[in-house]
Image (cartoon, rainbow, N blue to C red):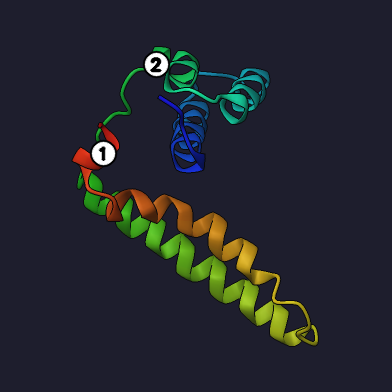
Amino acid sequence: MRVGDLEREAARARLVEAYAAGRIDAPELESRAAAVWGAARAAELAAVVDDLGEDPVSPGGADSRFVRDLLAFLICGAIAILAWHLTGEGFFWPVWVLIYTGLPLLRFLIPRSATHT
């Protein structure tokens, strides 16, 4: 089965969390991230992240993760839009910040059963 950018972004987030938890080091993070973005099939993507294990469930679970991702989206977006406005506007470059910080929110909008077909 082929994978898209949403699945690659979820795998990248798992890598970053593993790095933050000290399970992988910076060079390994970089090499695995390159493999994630080069993966075309689910098996290739799984080979990069499956040995990391499941992410430990934090208190609050998905709710706290949603709040964290939403706050990152809103705060980063507001700062980028303010900077864009204060620097004379022009091309609306904050769209890139909004897209990047909004991608993790998509996992809460897509039903769990739709991602495992």
Q: Amino acid at mark 1?
A: Ser
Residue 50: mark in rendering: 2
Q: Residues within 10 Å of mark 1 (few under 14, many from 20)?
A: few
Q: Is residue 17 left or right of residue 111?
A: right
Tag 2–tag 1 contact (CB < 8 Å)? no
Q: Residue furthest front?
A: 1
- The image quadrant where one finds the N terminus is top left
Identify which residue, 13 or 6, lies in the foreground.
Answer: 6
The x, y position of residue 117, in whole percent, is 25, 32
The x, y position of residue 99, in whole percent, is 55, 60
Residue at left offset 74%, top offset 86% = 86
Q: Is residue 114 left or right of residue 88?
A: left
**Residue 94's image quarter?**
bottom right
Q: Give the mark toward the camera: 2 or 1.
A: 2
Q: Residues within 10 Å of mark 2 (few under 14, many from 20)?
A: few
- What's the CA distance linking mark 2 and mark 1? 19 Å
Q: Amino acid at mark 2?
A: Asp
Identify which residue, 101 or 79, lies in the foreground.
Answer: 101
Identify which residue, 112 or 18, lies in the foreground.
Answer: 112
Q: How many marks?
A: 2
User: Which of pointers 2 and 1 lies earlier in the amino acid sequence?
Assistant: 2
Residue 59, relative to residue 28: is it above or below? below
The x, y position of residue 66, in whole percent, is 31, 55
Residue 26, relative to residue 5: is it above or below? above
Q: Secondary structure at mark 2?
A: helix
Residue 78, relative to residue 70: is it above or below? below
Q: Secondary structure at mark 1?
A: loop
Residue 58: mark in rendering: 1
Residue 86, relative to residue 100: is it above or below? below
The x, y position of residue 91, in whole percent, is 76, 77
**Residue 83's image quarter?**
bottom right
